[in-house]
């Protein structure tokens, strides 16, 4: 079994991950004050009661009570195990989950499949470059793909044989089952197997960390389908992956943008021509998961499509996927190529500078949206302008509260000539049509808690209050479970400073206190944030006063007090909170 993931790694991971991004890529969120809201993904509801706090890095549903960290969300929403959730988050931010001190043996399908895919890619690459087999090399040369590029992208060739991989990697039932799970072979009607990829140029599909998880095969000459992807497997979810992402990450960061195209050879051709920040979807429309991954890599996305109807339809679907993530600071634009051209042919024809000039002149998302909406109606008629408002409503509802959304509303006002108040009333009506308005429900407030619980709630949500605190063991004389937990949490914070609420709670996932700390992370306070630290100091002082009271009671009940007892009684009458102060 895999070793335990070090708590230090989880703390660092949750410091890098933003829960808003994690959830928003799966459940579109809308800004609501300092938080974000949505209809809860864990129960049916018509009015949003699911809230996400960037400050706490926590979510909570006021309807069904579900709450937790980004890890908890992935476990619940994606039906994942704890390690799978950690690996998912780590992959998204480019971190490698460490092995345990005892080492992590290669076990389980996931590791075995990764190992198999790496071996298969090596075999395919060798087949491409074998001197006695010129056909695939001649094909790539005819497409203008150089040897250097084929090596860079790990391109290979699957021989036109029914049992090439079976003979190399399918010696027994176990190995054949593994090949099947990897999507590399297909079972026939008689219960036997044959190779899925035959006579194709093989493009390895890698995850963000550069591990081969699938293949895309392009037939040489005639044949259908022209492109054949691996089926979905334990390793590969087509709607989640992008071709060329691992290779493009460094150029993307340098350029500050990422170019999204539709074909493997487009990515290869663009990189060969000097535009190395391109990736491709895998025969699917751009998905919200793609958008999340791309916005993690860069703040600017540029989509490049053919200028025909199919290209514009693909652009519209891409727009719908990125729209819920259009926070301030994000940029999206669209480039449409001349009829019959693709990015690979275009950069070969006009060169890097001219192609990048096209990218610079791409149509911003707002211009694209209004151009498409206006093409569907007659703006010279009142009815056409009314239609424009109606068509814009779902766009408005999909977007987070941001400057670009309000600027688009200003454009709508100008295009229709209607008043700002009227436009806003129409758009607001659409955004709340699914149910009656109601006030945002609140969680239990800390004012109703006992002193120790209230102190814990404040500390869990503001871990910095406990980092430098010392001398708290004396509080345990109160024999209150929450006081003991308070002391334990502060002890943990002293050893692990600078962590956030989510990392603190996750550290206790395997303990009996996990649910308790989760509940404390949800609570609201009756004092302003700027006053909370002073409030916390007062709570600790009151707890020490209770310690002094307890000591006095114990001493005065003794019938034979010694001089040492009298001394301790005198000390207990002094102000005791100093031992709990910060140093």
Image: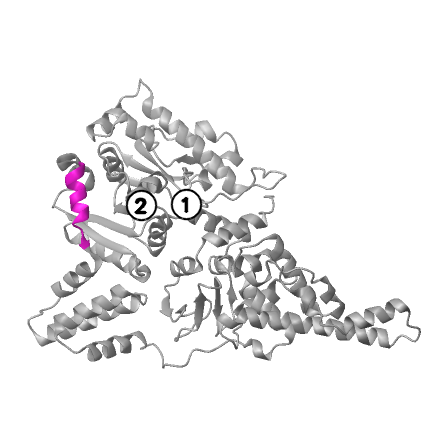
Disc 1 on helix, strand or loop? Answer: loop
Question: In percent of the image, x 37 and y 24: which residue is there?
Answer: 126
- The stretch in magenta equals 352-363
Question: In percent of the image, x 61 and y 62: which residue is there?
Answer: 514
Crowd around label 2: few <14 · some 14–19 · many ≥20 (10 Å): many
Q: Which quadrant holds the C terminus?
A: bottom right
Question: In percent of the image, x 24 and y 76: which residue is there?
Answer: 424
**Percent coordinates x, y for residue 36 in the rendering:** 40, 67
**Percent coordinates x, y for residue 443 in the rendering:** 51, 75
Label 2 belongs to which residue? Answer: 282
Label 1 belongs to which residue? Answer: 236
Please give left or right for residue 573 compared with residue 58 in the image. right
Gap between marks 2 and 1 measured at Cα: 11 Å
Residue in the foreground of this view, choosing between 291 and 358: 358
Residue 409 sits in which quadrant? bottom left
**Percent coordinates x, y for residue 81 in the rendering:** 54, 53
Mark 2 vs mark 1: which is more N-terminal? Answer: 1
Is there any visible trace of residue 29 in the rendered image?
yes
**523 part of magenta stretch:** no
Residue in the foreground of this view, choosing between 134 and 105: 105
Crowd around label 1: few <14 · some 14–19 · many ≥20 (10 Å): many
View extreme (left): residue: 380
View extreme (top): residue: 132
Question: In percent of the image, x 68 and y 72: which residue is there?
Answer: 543
Please give left or right for residue 45 compared with residue 488 in the image. left
Q: Which quadrant holds the N terminus?
A: top right
Decide whether the magenta segment is chiefly helix, strand or loop.
Answer: helix
Residue in the foreground of this view, choosing between 234 and 382: 382
Is there any visible trace of residue 191 in the rendered image?
no
View extreme (right): residue: 560
Please give left or right for residue 148 compared with residue 60 in the image. left
């Amino acid at each position: 079994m895999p070793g335990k993931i070090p708590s230090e790694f989880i703390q660092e991971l949750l410091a890098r991950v933003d829960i808003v991004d994690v959830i928003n890529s799966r459940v579109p969120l809308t800004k609501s004050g300092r938080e974000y809201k949505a209809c809860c993904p864990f129960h049916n509801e018509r009015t949003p009661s699911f809230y996400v706090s960037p400050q706490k890095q926590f979510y909570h549903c006021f309807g069904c009570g579900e709450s937790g960290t980004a890890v908890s969300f992935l476990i619940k929403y994606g039906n994942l195990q704890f390690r799978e959730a950690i690996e998912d988050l780590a992959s998204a931010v480019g971190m490698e989950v460490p092995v345990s001190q005892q080492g992590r043996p290669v076990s389980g399908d996931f590791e075995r499949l990764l190992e198999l895919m790496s071996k298969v890619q090596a075999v395919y690459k060798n087949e491409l470059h074998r001197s006695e087999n010129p056909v695939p090399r001649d094909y790539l040369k005819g497409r203008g793909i150089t040897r250097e590029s084929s090596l860079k992208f790990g391109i290979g060739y699957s021989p036109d044989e029914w049992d090439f991989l079976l003979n190399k990697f399918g010696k027994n039932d176990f190995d054949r089952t593994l090949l099947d799970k990897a999507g590399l072979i297909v079972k026939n009607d008689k219960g036997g197997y044959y190779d899925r990829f035959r006579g194709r140029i093989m493009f390895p599909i890698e995850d963000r960390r550069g591990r081969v998880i699938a293949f895309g095969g392009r037939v040489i000459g005639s044949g259908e389908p022209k492109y054949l992807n691996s089926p979905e497997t334990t390793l590969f979810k087509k709607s989640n992956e992008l071709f060329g992402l691992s290779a493009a990450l460094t150029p993307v960061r340098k350029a500050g943008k990422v170019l999204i195209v539709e074909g493997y050879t487009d990515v290869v051709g663009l990189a060969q021509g000097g535009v190395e920040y391109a990736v491709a979807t895998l025969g699917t429309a751009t998905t919200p998961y793609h958008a999340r991954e791309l916005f993690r890599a860069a703040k600017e996305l540029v989509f490049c499509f053919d200028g025909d109807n199919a290209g514009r339809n693909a652009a519209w679907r891409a727009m719908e996927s990125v729209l819920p993530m259009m926070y301030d600071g994000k940029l999206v634009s669209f480039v449409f190529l001349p009829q019959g051209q693709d990015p690979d042919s275009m950069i070969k024809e006009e060169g890097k500078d001219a192609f990048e000039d096209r990218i610079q002149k791409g149509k911003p998302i707002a211009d694209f949206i209004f151009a498409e909406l206006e093409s569907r109606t007659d703006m010279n008629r009142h009815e056409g302008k009314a239609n424009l408002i109606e068509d814009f409503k779902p766009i408005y509802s999909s977007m987070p509260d941001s400057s670009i959304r309000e600027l688009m509303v200003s454009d709508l006002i100008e295009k229709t000539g209607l008043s700002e108040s009227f436009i806003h009333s129409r758009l607001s009506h659409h955004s709340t049509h699914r149910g009656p308005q109601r006030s945002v429900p609140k969680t239990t407030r800390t004012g109703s808690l006992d002193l120790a619980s209230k102190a814990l709630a404040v500390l869990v949500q503001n871990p910095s209050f406990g980092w430098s605190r010392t001398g708290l063991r004396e509080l345990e004389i109160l024999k209150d479970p929450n006081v003991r937990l308070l002391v334990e949490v502060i002890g943990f914070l002293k050893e692990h400073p600078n962590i956030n609420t989510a990392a603190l709670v996750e550290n206790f996932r395997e303990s009996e206190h996990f649910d308790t700390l989760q509940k404390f992370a949800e609570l609201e306070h009756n004092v302003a944030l700027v006053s909370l630290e002073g409030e916390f100091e007062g709570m600790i002082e009151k707890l020490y006063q209770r310690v002094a009271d307890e000591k006095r009671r114990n001493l005065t009940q003794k019938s034979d007090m010694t001089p040492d007892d009298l001394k301790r009684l005198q000390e207990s009458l002094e102000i005791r909170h100093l031992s709990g102060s910060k140093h």
